[in-house]
Amino acid sequence: ASLLNKISVAKKIELGKENKKKQSIAVLDIGITHSLIAQLEKLGFPLTILPYDTRSQEILRLKPKGLVISNGPEEDIALAAIADSLRALLGKMPILGISTGHQLLARCLGAKVIKMKLGHRGVNYPLHNPASYKGEITCQNHSWVVDADSLARIKGVKITGYNLNDRTVEEVEGRKLKVLGAQYLPVSPGWGEPHPVFRRFLKIITKE
């Protein structure tokens, strides 16, 4: 049985729907936390929270401004079917994958996801963007990672964040496909402000 039946919403939930002037951002709930929902609300768009088993056709019918695939359990019987369904959305709308959502996004793109010998658990993991000298300390809680070699064979997608301790993939981006994935947990920097990865996603969807 799928654990997602217990931790994902049972039916569609709309937040901020009084803001009728804007299209909503769809959120596929794989086990999303309240803190991530709070950060998404700060982006200024209504949110439509969807059960994990919502089919791609249903998401397309909603005509959202973008799609967020949330964090959740990494080993669940339902994940393969979710990835198969979401593949049809690539190039149709901006997509942000968080943690398990990042892994699902990578699988949709054709990359492999592999299990680590030792997972990342903690609040002090250093991340590096190869295009700059900037670093970031991140919060992480995962046992699986996207395989860098399989990701390198996918055109139009690049690795934008590595874990400095072991060089595992922590962030990917595909500008043409308008996809963004973060393996780490994007914790608010404080005062309820959204993490920078949500700001980057906002820039993508506002260009639509």
Image (spheres, rainbow, N blue to C red):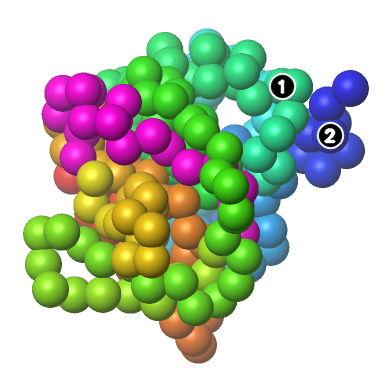
Task: Classify the position of the C terminus by image quarter.
Answer: top left
Compared to 69, does 17 lie above or below? below
The reply, left or right, for residue 125 in relation to residue 51 is left
Q: Does the rendering let one see residue 67? A: no
**Labelled disc at residue 53:** none
The reply, left or right, for residue 60 in relation to residue 121 is left
Compared to 47, does 12 lie above or below? above
Q: Amino acid at mark 2?
A: Leu
- Which residues are the magenta region? 141-158
Compared to 144, does 187 lie above or below? below
Q: Quadrant of residue 165?
A: bottom left
Task: Classify the position of the N terminus by image quarter.
Answer: top right
Q: On the image, numbered disc 1 is attached to which residue?
A: 78
How many angstroms separate mark 1 from mark 2 (CA)?
Answer: 9 Å
Q: Residue at x 38, y 72 (%)?
A: 126
x and y, in percent, of residue 108 in the image: 42, 21
Q: Amino acid at mark 1?
A: Ala
Q: Residues within 10 Å of mark 2 (few under 14, many from 20)?
A: some
x and y, in percent, of residue 36 in the image: 58, 61
> Which secondary structure, mark 1?
loop
